[in-house]
Image (spheres, grey):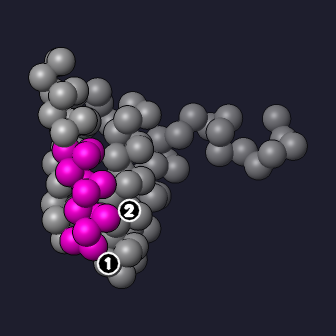
Amino acid sequence: MASREAKLTRLSHQVAKAKTQGDLAEAEYLCRQIVDLTSTTFGQFDEDYAKALLELAEILEAEQKYAEALSLRSRIVNFMPSKQKQPSGTK
């Protein structure tokens, strides 16, 4: 698993670099790899997977791919624990 985590770290740095350089297509490509790797490494109910989906959604929004970004954000909300979905002030 350590090699997968090292690969995730390397990919995250590459995504940040691509975004800084304005290469959103490359950032999207790399981020999709992170999503796949976090899914297989940690599972689809892991916080790292949710963070990867969120990062990808943000990139897609920057590319004006709003429908896909919204779909990813919905997936994140759907697997959050129910106590986190409630508005503040409710129990």
Residue 41's quadrant in the figure?
top left
- Residue positioned 65% across, 45% down in the render: 85
Please tell me whether residue 71 is drawn above or below residue 67 in the rendered image. Answer: above
Q: Is residue 36 left or right of residue 85?
A: left
* Relative image position of residue 23 (x, y in whole percent): 22, 71
- Residue positioned 12% across, 23% down in the render: 3
* Relative image position of residue 47 (x, y in whole percent): 43, 34
As drawn, which residue projects farthest toward the bottom?
A: 64
* Relative image position of residue 28 (x, y in whole percent): 23, 63
Residue closer to the observer: 24 or 56:
24
Q: Quadrant of the N terminus?
A: top left
- Residue positioned 45% across, 58% down in the render: 73
- 90 is within the stretch colored magenta: no
- Mark 2 residue type: Ala
Residue closer to the observer: 14 or 8:
14
Please tell me whether residue 66 is drawn above or below residue 71 in the rendered image. Answer: below
Is residue 42 visible to us here?
A: yes
Q: Of helix, strand and loop, which one carries label 2?
A: helix
- 16 is within the stretch colored magenta: yes
Residue 57 circle label: 2
Q: Quadrant of the C terminus?
A: top right
Residue closer to the observer: 35 or 21:
21
First in residue order: circle 2 vs circle 1: 2
Q: CA distance from mark 2 to mark 1?
A: 10 Å
* Relative image position of residue 10 (x, y in whole percent): 19, 39
- The magenta stretch is 11-23
Neighbor class of circle 2 (other Cα within 10 Å; few <14, some 14-19, many 20+) is: many
Residue closer to the observer: 91 or 63:
63
Neighbor class of circle 1 (other Cα within 10 Å; few <14, some 14-19, many 20+) is: few
Most frequent secondary structure within the magenta stretch: helix
Is residue 35 visible to us here?
A: no
Q: Read off the residue under disc 1.
A: 63
